[in-house]
């Protein structure tokens, strides 16, 4: 099973949301959709999707900004999410190579690889309502 990494598109939104939920993140759907759309349309962000057998099994987001002290472009890996059913080492390696490679090709002088540090921990799945 090969892992294919590509740029995310608007049509991936529902599948990305589903993958996020599978690892314990439960963003409010409307807020997720608005943020997803803004992120994809902003040239200072990269969103990469990993697919395996037609299913989305991973996602990486990278933000780009200029830093005066660095004298150039700084890239920060903001999120790295891998679905539980995925072959984590293969998906992780493919996502990192594609995402970091793209940042370097855009001229990033430094790439910070500390993903998910500012993100709150996943919440437990909501309890089912009992009648």
Image (tube, helix red, strand yellow):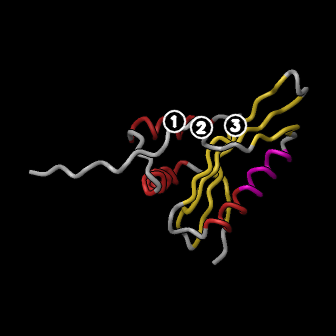
Q: CA distance from mark 3 to mark 2?
A: 9 Å
Disc 3 crowd, CA 10 A, few/some/many (<14, 14-19, 20+) = many
What secondary structure do most residues of the magenta stretch adopt?
A: helix
Label 3 sits on a secondary structure element that is strand
Residue 63 numbered tag: 3
Q: Are marks 3 and 1 in contact (CB under 8 Å)?
A: no
What residue do we see at 78% from left, 50% from top? 100
- What's the CA distance linking mark 3 and mark 1? 14 Å
Marks 3 and 2 in Cβ contact (< 8 Å): no
Name the residue rendered at 67%, 60% in the picture. Answer: 92
Please give the label number shown on residue 39: 2
The residue under the point 86% across, 47% down is 105
Q: Earlier in the sequence, mark 3 or mark 2?
A: 2
Residue 56 image-quadrant placement: bottom right
- Residue annotated with mark 1: 35
Q: Compute the Cα span from label 2 to label 1.
A: 6 Å
- Compare marks 3 and 1 and give the one earlier in the sequence: 1
Q: Which residue is most to the top?
A: 68
Tell me the crowding category of disc 1: few under 14, some 14 to 19, or many 20 or more residues within 10 angstroms, Cα based: few
Q: Find the residue positioned furthest to the right.
A: 71
Q: Position of residue 129 (x, y in %)?
A: 17, 49
Q: How far across and down, in percent of the image, does residue 112 sit? A: 76, 40
Q: Is residue 102 left or right of residue 24?
A: right
SS type, badge 2: helix
Q: Is residue 103 above or below residue 86?
A: above
Residue 124 placement (x, y as % from top left): 37, 48
Residues rendered magenta in the picture: 96-105
Q: Nearer the viewer, mark 3 or mark 2?
A: 3
Residue 22, magenta (yes or no): no
Whether 111 is drawn above or below 54: the answer is above
21 or 30: nearer the viewer: 21
Circles 2 and 1, Cβ within 8 Å, touching? The answer is yes
């Amino acid at each position: 099973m090969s892992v294919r990494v590509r740029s995310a598109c608007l049509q991936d939104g529902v599948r990305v949301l589903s993958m996020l939920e599978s690892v314990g993140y439960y963003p409010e759907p409307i807020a997720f959709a608005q943020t997803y759309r803004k992120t994809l349309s902003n040239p200072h962000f990269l969103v990469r999707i990993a697919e395996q057998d037609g299913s989305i099994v991973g996602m990486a987001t990278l933000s780009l900004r200029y830093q005066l002290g660095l004298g150039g472009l700084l890239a920060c890996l903001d999120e790295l999410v891998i679905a539980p059913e995925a072959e984590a080492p293969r998906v992780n390696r493919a996502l990192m190579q594609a995402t970091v490679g793209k940042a370097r090709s855009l001229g990033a002088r430094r790439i910070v690889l500390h993903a998910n540090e500012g993100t709150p921990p996943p919440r437990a799945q909501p309890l089912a309502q009992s009648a």
